[in-house]
Amino acid sequence: MVIGLGYVELPLAREASLSGLRVVGYDLNEEIVAGLNSGRSHVGDIPSADVAEMLAKGFRATAAETEAGDPETIVICVPTPLSADSTPDLTAVSAATETAGRLLRPGMLVLLESTTYPGTTDEIVRPLLEKISGLTVGVDFSLAFSPERIDPGNPDFGLRNTPKVVGGQTTSCAERFYGKLCDQVIRARSTREAEMAKLLENTYRHVNIALVNEMAVFCHELGIDLWDAIRCAATKPFGFQAFHPGPGVGGHCIPIDPNYLGYKVRTLGYPFRFVELAQEINCRMPGYVVERAVELLNGAAKALNGARVLLLGVTNKKDVADQRESPVKVIGGKLRARGADLVYHDPHVAQWSAGGEPTRRADDLDAELAAADLVILLQDHQVGVRPGPDLPHCPPGPRHPWTSRRIEYREAVSKRGLWPRCGTSPLGAGPEPAASRVRAAAHPHRGC
Ligand SMILES: NC(=O)c1ccc[n+]([C@@H]2O[C@H](COP(=O)([O-])OP(=O)(O)OC[C@H]3O[C@@H](n4cnc5c(N)ncnc54)[C@H](O)[C@@H]3O)[C@@H](O)[C@H]2O)c1
């Protein structure tokens, strides 16, 4: 049984189902449940055809825990957002654990996959399960934590070929379970190390993105093309991993998860300064993009107020439809507040609003590129993909009929002569060459 049928658990339910396990999915969202039961996927990486195949193999979704049947294993992966004061909000984890507790029987395995601070499985999940069921972990049932490492939109790595870390007091059952779904299972010393591993991965990205974002700001003023410097540094075959500057961080992980770790560190009486600094720098980026937009327009003797600004890509990550925590929302709101006439283009997003108002969608990219005073490349989706033998790398995800040509945004912009260097982004680049048209660009780093 999987609890939560979102971006993370639907791929797991698919893998389990296709591996021959009988899977029931439980989700509070009745629309999602009804959609899945009628063969409709709501997750970009999972085509509806896969849901149909899952159904044929016995998968069913339910919004009633009484219809869960008699599961041997329960996997929990529900949201772990922040509360209003930026502290961890474990409401969904607790509610899902209560559901698991009510279904718990001797011999069962419970797995938590939600990203959370070290200690959650042992301090929150375990006592709740034991209290509700009257059973004891390690004696009557097994409990483990396994961080989810799904990377939506990644055509190379999925659940099966990404090593799965798992840690628990009773890890062998969990290892056996994941061994059916993944090629490699890595045993952590305990639940805490497994929980920490995920936060280490995400904090590492958060901090490194902040590092290049800060560099982007001063490299621009120093007249240094940071993208070229990164390209050169990345040729070193050891000791360096390339991160690229962007307009902020998006997705459900990078802007949120390091706060979970910061929260845990603060319980010790001191701050986690790296995380706080990274947060501060990354949160400044949307405002910086707007300032650069003003500067670019000014260079062309134009004001932002009244300028036609075309935003390319509004999701939180390349080639996915997910908009959660997308910094583009903040940028759009700021541009609109300063009087910009906004238009957006995104093959994955049919409707989009900024600053609380709907934004016009560009149907004809060439015409909009020609009409815009400023083009801001925010997410370099491969657009206009139509699956076919000539497009072997066609990314997965929903597509709209109005994007029927294969053209990359950066290519599109450079074709119009609006781009200083094809294949590079001027965010963090040196001084802008004089041009009649204004251009700016920013790439969010890959999200979750
Ligand atoms: N999305 C990613 O790329 C990603 C990657 C790695 C880790 N994670 C982590 O995985 C967790 C889940 O993220 P997601 O992106 O799958 O979220 P999601 O919002 O896509 O899906 C979560 C689902 O859980 C359901 N739900 C909430 N409370 C419930 C409850 N008590 N009982 C049953 N269902 C409930 C919601 O209706 C929703 O459908 C989070 O901790 C997130 O940080 C996400």
Image (cartoon, rainbow, N blue to C red):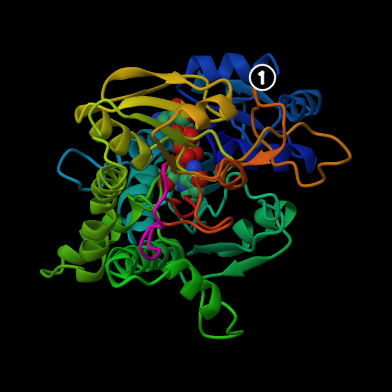
Give neighbour class at mark 1: few <14, some 14-19, many 20+ (Cα, 10 Å). Answer: some
Q: Nearer the viewer, residue 103 or 271?
A: 271
**Location of residue 402 in the rendering, given as x and y in whole percent from the top left corner:** 65, 20
**Location of residue 261 in the rendering, given as x and y in whole percent from the top left corner:** 29, 61
| Residue at 56% from the left image edge and 38% from the top image edge | 320
| Residue at 56% from the left image edge and 20% from the top image edge | 363
Residue linked to disc 1 = 40
From where the camera sits, is residue 292 visible? Answer: yes
Span of residues in magenta: 427-436
Q: Nearer the viewer, residue 12 or 409?
A: 409
**Location of residue 258 in the rendering, given as x and y in whole percent from the top left corner:** 31, 58
Q: Amino acid at mark 1?
A: Arg
- Residue placed farthest to the left in the image? 269
From where the camera sits, is residue 112 visible? Answer: no
Q: Is residue 84 left or right of residue 246?
A: left
Q: Answer with the quarter of the image where residue 38 lies.
A: top right
